[in-house]
Image: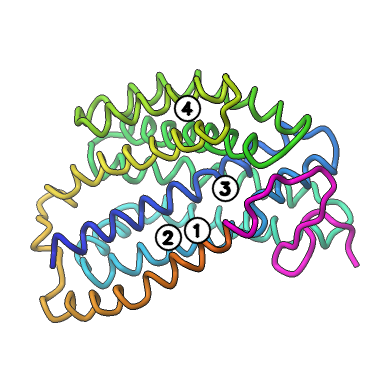
Amino acid sequence: MIEFWFVIIAFLWTGYFVLEGFDFGVGMLTPLVSRNAAEQRAGLQTIGPVWDGNEVWLITAVGAMFAAFPAWYAGMFSSFYLPVTLILVGLIVRGVGLEWRGKVDNPFWCDLGIVVGSALPAFLWGAVFAGLLFDGPVAALLGGAFTLAVCVLHGAVFLALRTTGPVRRRARTAAVIAGGVTIPVAVAALSGLGTIPALAAMAALAAGTALIWRRREGWAFAATAGAIVLATLAVFMELRMRPLPGLTLAEAASGPYTLTMLSWIGLITLPFVLGYQGWTYWVFRKRVMTGRPVQVAGQVAGAPPR
């Protein structure tokens, strides 16, 4: 049961990084690939129906850690109290920006909040997980730079996949540039792990950059998503041996009864969550046209206030 729940937690974190990865990237890039309000609105509409649902993966992953591995949960979030607090601040600021952008006359501060609130978690999550694996501020900075760069690349590819016209072209250009930055950063950040998934993640990032250059957005998105999956797998393979300094996985785990009850709850609820989110992505699968309104939490994103 201990190994089973470790795999579940790794799966939840992987889903969070894949889905929120392009959310963060879109939030950071939309002002750069937009030339007017309509184009910026179209960029944000690509994540409008799904961004808050993607954050559920984080809540579920943290909740599962708390229940299945309380010692790991306590040690991780107390050791990295400041960066985790800044992550929460960033997520709150980003959420406020996305929710209020269509309700104010001047959305500048909302747009700034979206950019900052996307960049902070994108960088700090990498710093936190690098801090779990390696000692020293250099490793944390390199881990943060890696996740930030990957999110920008992943988001640019997603924008190119989900938009049309000038936004799509600029997003494709941004993805090629981001790929040129991400690949060397990935080599520096992942070479310390030295595992097959880490090497495969580097290859997937290179493939994603080549595919977006050839205008194969769908395959490029699959490649960048695969790179995130492989990189997360490499990290959790290391954490399986030592989730915290001086702490083994068995020592961090809850008792057998707790893990058994969690397993029944997870087997009942997880398929419904996956089914609902899959249906959401299917409904909003079409490309966003510039100027086309999409509902975001009861309000059209970027529309004039009522």
The amino acid sitting under disc 4 is: Gly
Q: Position of residue 146 (x, y in %)?
A: 41, 32
The amino acid sitting under disc 3 is: Asp
Q: Is residue 157 left or right of residue 222?
A: right
Q: Residues within 10 Å of mark 3 (few under 14, many from 20)?
A: many
Q: Residues within 10 Å of mark 1 (few under 14, many from 20)?
A: some
Relative to 136, residue 42 above or below: below
Mark 3 to mark 4 CA distance (whole Å): 18 Å
* Label tally: 4
The amino acid sitting under disc 1 is: Leu
Which residue was labeled with disc 2?
58
Mark 1 to mark 3 CA distance (whole Å): 15 Å
Which residue was labeled with disc 4?
208
Mark 1 to mark 4 CA distance (whole Å): 30 Å
Question: Which tag is nearer the camera, tag 4 or tag 2?
Answer: 4
Q: Position of residue 264 (x, y in %)?
A: 25, 79
Chief secondary structure of the magenta span? loop
Mark 4 to mark 2 CA distance (whole Å): 25 Å
Residue at 19% x, 44% y is 237
Q: Secondary structure at mark 3?
A: helix
Residue at 63% x, 44% y is 27
**Callout 2–callout 3 Cβ contact below 8 Å:** no
Magenta range is: 282-306
Residue at 72% x, 43% y is 43
**Callout 2–callout 1 Cβ contact below 8 Å:** no
Q: Quadrant of residue 81?
A: bottom left
Which residue was labeled with disc 1?
88
> Quick one: quadrant of the N terminus?
bottom left
**Callout 4–callout 2 Cβ contact below 8 Å:** no
